[in-house]
Image (cartoon, grey):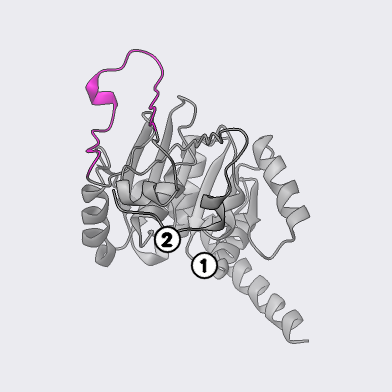
């Protein structure tokens, strides 16, 4: 073996052997990435609940760098137009009657607009989890979400690192993730501790090919094409259009306050 670089850590011999235990629902199998953790003779243990057939587990090549996913997680993608994305989010949350749904966007602005729109639409207890709020407020929001007082929590990837809640039944990728790691960490928020969960990714036509190729190479099992017929959305349209009008008014008011 090649000699290792001499560091302060390597020259200090601890009195007692140090043991590191790492836990992850979405652990990479890439040996290069695992090596960066600086583990000595590491051992990997995988667990699952009950007697499950091979079809219930994701096949993982230890040398491929692919990710493992929770056994109870079902992956879906929804082809849609840009204008219908907020309506589809509301449809999924209402139709599935989830007590805890987590929705991800790619920007703070998108999170805020979607939050205001869902709030104006009504019928769903919704909150925004972003850097607009201080640590204390975010902690309070997270506690309410965990208690089931908030049904839909909308977050960016940046602030989502602080979200560790059991019982999330649904993850919605409002904005399609550009990187595999982002997708893995988003959907890994559901189907924890042997429970089931569903993940829906909303895709514009121009995004489909790249996204499907990305998740296919990652070994995502059985990504289901989930088409939502217009007739299922139609009952929500009138209320949705009213909410859109209210959203524009609210945004203008916020801009005035910001400029003042």
Q: Is residue 235 visible?
A: no
Instruction: Say which mark, if any, is on residue 175.
Output: 2
Q: Position of residue 96 (x, y in %)?
A: 47, 36
The secondary structure that most of the magenta stretch takes on is loop
> Left or right: 208 with respect to 102?
left
Give the mark, 2 or 1, whose residue is nearer the N terminus.
1
Question: Is residue 80 in the magenta section?
Answer: no
Q: Quadrant of residue 26?
A: top left
> Left or right: 224 with respect to 131?
left
**The residue positioned farthest toward the bottom in the image shown:** 260
**In the foreground, 142 or 49:** 49
For disc 1, the marked residue is 107
Q: Quadrant of residue 99?
A: top right
**The residue positioned farthest toward the top in the image shown:** 51
Q: Position of residue 165 (x, y in %)?
A: 60, 38
Mark 2 touches mark 1? (CB < 8 Å): yes
> Left or right: 193 with respect to 150?
left
Q: Position of residue 244 (x, y in %)?
A: 55, 66
Question: Is residue 54 in the magenta section?
Answer: yes
Q: Measure how far apart labels 2 and 1 are at the Cα level.
A: 9 Å
Q: Residue at x 72, y 61 (%)?
A: 133
Instruction: Say which mark, if any, is on residue 82.
Output: none
Q: Secondary structure at mark 2?
A: loop
Q: Is residue 28 above or below residue 210?
A: above
**In the foreground, 165 or 235:** 165
Q: How many marks?
A: 2
Q: Is residue 43 visible?
A: yes
**In the foreground, 246 or 106:** 106
Q: Position of residue 29 (x, y in %)?
A: 32, 42
**In the foreground, 216 or 246:** 216
Q: Secondary structure at mark 1?
A: loop
Q: Which residues are magenta?
A: 43-63
């Amino acid at each position: 073996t090649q000699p290792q670089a001499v560091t302060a850590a390597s020259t200090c011999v601890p009195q007692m052997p140090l043991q590191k235990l790492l836990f992850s629902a979405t652990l990479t199998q890439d040996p290069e990435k695992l090596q960066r953790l600086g583990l000595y003779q590491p051992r990997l243990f995988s667990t699952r609940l009950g007697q499950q057939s091979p079809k219930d587990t994701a096949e993982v090549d230890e040398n491929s760098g692919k990710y493992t996913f929770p056994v109870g997680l079902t992956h879906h993608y929804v082809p849609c137009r840009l204008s219908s994305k907020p309506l589809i989010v509301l449809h999924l949350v209402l139709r599935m009657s989830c007590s805890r749904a987590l929705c991800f966007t790619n920007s703070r602005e998108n999170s805020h607009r979607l939050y205001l729109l869902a709030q104006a639409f009504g019928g769903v207890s919704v909150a925004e989890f972003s850097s607009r709020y201080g640590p204390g407020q975010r902690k309070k929001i997270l506690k309410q979400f965990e208690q089931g007082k908030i049904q839909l929590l909308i977050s960016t990837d940046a602030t989502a690192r602080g979200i560790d809640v059991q019982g999330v039944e649904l993850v919605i990728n409002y904005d399609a993730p550009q990187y595999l790691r982002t997708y893995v960490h988003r959907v890994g928020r559901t189907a924890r501790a042997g429970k089931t969960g569903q993940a829906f990714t909303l895709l514009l036509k121009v995004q489909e090919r790249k996204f499907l190729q990305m998740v296919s190479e990652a070994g995502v099992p059985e990504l289901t094409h989930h088409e939502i017929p217009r007739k299922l959305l139609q009952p929500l349209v009138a209320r949705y259009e009213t909410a859109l009008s209210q959203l524009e008014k609210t945004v203008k008011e916020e801009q005035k306050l910001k400029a003042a």
